[in-house]
Image (cartoon, coloured by chain):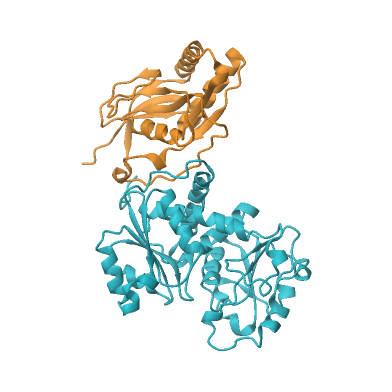
Amino acid sequence: MPFFHKHLLGIQDLSKKDILTILETAESMEGISTRDVKKVPVLRGKTIINLFLEPSTRTSSSFELAAKRLSADIINFNRQASSVLKGESLRDTVENLEAMYADAIIIRHTAAGAPHYVSTFCRSHIINAGDGAHEHPTQALLDAYTIKQKKKKFEGLKVVIVGDILHSRVARSNILCLHKLGTHIILSGPPALVPESLEKFKVEVNYDMDRAVEDADVIMMLRIQKERQQKNSYPSIREYRFLYSLTEKKLKKAKKKVIIMHPGPVNKGVELTSDLASSDRSVILKQVENGVSVRMAVLYLLLGGKEREATD
Amino acid sequence: MDVKIKARIMDAKKIKRVFQRITTEIIERNRNLNQLVIVGIRTRGVHIARRIQKLIKNLEDEDVPLGILDATLYRDDFSDLNKQHIIKKTEIGFDISDKDILLVDDVIFTGRTIRAAMDSLFDLGRPRSIQLLVFIDRGHRELPIQADYTGKFLPTSRRENVKVRLKELDNIDEVLITEPIEIQ
């Protein structure tokens, strides 16, 4: 199953086949990270720029490790020490970086659509590492990978996503991705933070979390995004915690072998308790571990080999 | 691209004899069979490796471990490939350090796959030796690599292609020479 994309801008552009190809490739990459020599030469000589214009721990270091394990050279663009602070525009920044012969640019930006915009004038491969409240494709791919690893299938699974759906690019990419893979999706959270316009994806909405998690195979908790809340969408953190925090009691309603996911960073005690975050049902650190394999797969599929003609 | 079959070189009977002969050669040369491990290169090399493993077991009652290698990530001719290679898992569940490795592939051509496979093995450990088994040697080497055990030397032109078909994958054991059909 070949993969014919130049950029990875969002899950929206991927077919089910594309997604499965990425997951399959990620599986093959997994062994590299656990062996003694954690490096293969496949992207030797390629230059990749990590352009993170919004803070990140996991995604940025995960991409950096992924690139290094494939032997690419990677530059971490540090916003605090750059001319962005002097008012240089995104376009100028990218064009200057590209003038130094970058093969790929990984972008995180506060504005939705920034990676799409960059891809319109850029020769390099563009990878979206999170744009505003729009998409975060590699997170959705690593979540799907983790679900596949634990559940061995997608069809018929009941996945519950809880929290601030409206401001969450993780939720959006995950809904698009899991929808394509054929899982049953249920959203829960404060009414002001759960959009109703998602019906075309056949998602179910249930504001009552106790009911939403009934018989769930996967519970995905989202972070309360304080930085993206314009006004209070819920009365107080205390009330949010009371209604939408994952507790042992709520968890009892889910399937016995339910897995708990969270894209991080966890607000411990708000979205879920510390105990649950480190319990054996939590796969939060597994998600982080899988992130590297999935990003290696994405980098390989985009940069490995030249522009492919549709022969053979 | 359409291809036509130019010649059928081997059938199941001949193939079986070749594997038997090679196995005898391997046993003759490796007095310490307990030092030996087999590594098959995906895809057809793996199936040939399994057959050799079984034949060694039959003849010498020795269980030789078998690993699977995908050398795609070590190839140097990446940018020349039109077709994208989907990477499969490398599954070598044993330590190769200080072992005698028998590397197995179906066809040797330029030698570049073998070079990639050897680089890949060295990142997994330091074997004592590597021996190479190829079923078909079709010539046209671009690197100084030769097999220790060869099933058949089959001179071909560069235009031609050698197809090894195996029961496990193709429901038939045979070796064919094919050629692309010119489109007028």
Work out which residue is located at the far left of the displayed protein and give it: B184
Q: Colour of chain A?
A: cyan
Work out which residue is located at the far front of the displayed protein and give it: A81
Vertical comparison of B35 with A84: above or below: above
Quarter assignment of residue A210: bottom right
Q: Does A169 sit left or right of B60 as displayed?
A: left
Residue located 47% across and 45% down the image:
A38
Q: Colour of chain B?
A: orange
Quarter assignment of residue B58: top right
Vertical comparison of A125 with B77: above or below: below
Residue located 32% across and 28% down the image:
B109
Vertical comparison of A134 with A280: above or below: below
Q: Quadrant of the C terminus of chain A?
A: top left
Residue located 55% across and 20% down the image:
B35
Question: Is residue A15 shown to the viewer in this render?
Answer: no
Q: Does A157 sit left or right of A17 as displayed?
A: right
Question: Is residue B56 shown to the viewer in this render?
Answer: yes
